[in-house]
Image (spheres, rainbow, N blue to C red):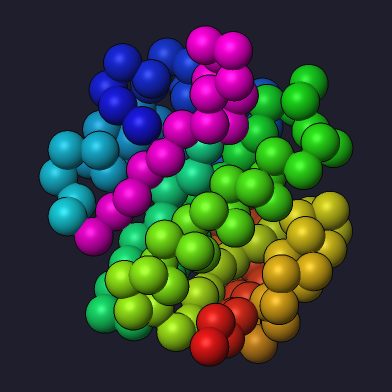
Amino acid sequence: MTLDDLPAVLAIEQVAKPTPWNEKSYRQEITDNDKSYPTALVVNSQLIGYIVWWLIVDEIQIQTIAIDPAKRGQGLGRALLTDALNKGLKQGATISTLEVRESNVVAQSLYQSLGYEVVGKRPNYYRDGETAYLMTAHLK
């Protein structure tokens, strides 16, 4: 992901997320966070998804992931997440964590299919007050 990708990322963010990140947050991930791996998924010159993940020592922390709603159901989210996990593994990661909305059963199903398990709850985690499930996957 580059700064030039931000208009497309933010357009997806607005329709894909109940509480979207702002441009400043993405700019910081791209330019100021040396632990961050912001990645865009581009197909036929069109940005259709993205993921931001951090590698902190041996842990991959998934910060955000989204696919254009018109392109969902094609395995693109799985491909983005799998790519991130594989890259992190090559850099020594042994575990991955993420938070997911309690109501987002589609995402939870994807994460569970990749080995994530619910290990806790974070009440009122999101700005709109929704609870998050904390999920963890052991990679090795």
- The location of residue 13, given as percent across then percent down, is 56, 29
Q: Nearer the viewer, residue 64 or 120?
A: 64
Q: From the viewer's perspective, is 96 left or right of 100?
A: left
Percent across and percent down for residue 62 are: 49, 61
Q: Quick check: is 40 in the magenta stretch?
A: yes
Q: Position of residue 106 (x, y in %)?
A: 84, 53
**Residue 121: in sight, yes or no?**
no
Q: Position of residue 120 (x, y in %)?
A: 64, 85
Magenta stretch: includes residue 123: no
Give above or below for 120 relative to 88. below
In this view, which residue lies farthest toward the front?
A: 90
Give the residues drawn in magenta, as a range: 35-49
Residue pictured at 31% horizontal, 71% vertical: 91
Instruction: Determine the image quadrant of residue 7.
Output: top left
Q: Left or right: where does residue 136 sit relative to residue 2? A: right
The dominant secondary structure in magenta is strand
Decide if residue 137 is on the left or right side of residue 91: right
Which residue appears at 39% of the width and 78% of the height?
Answer: 93
For image coordinates 59% across by 12% down, the residue present is 44
| Position of 107 relative to 44 (above/below) | below
Q: Nearer the viewer, residue 51 or 134?
A: 51
Residue sitting at x 64%, y 47%: 79
Give the total of numbered labels: 0
User: Camera-side residue: 90 or 135?
Assistant: 90
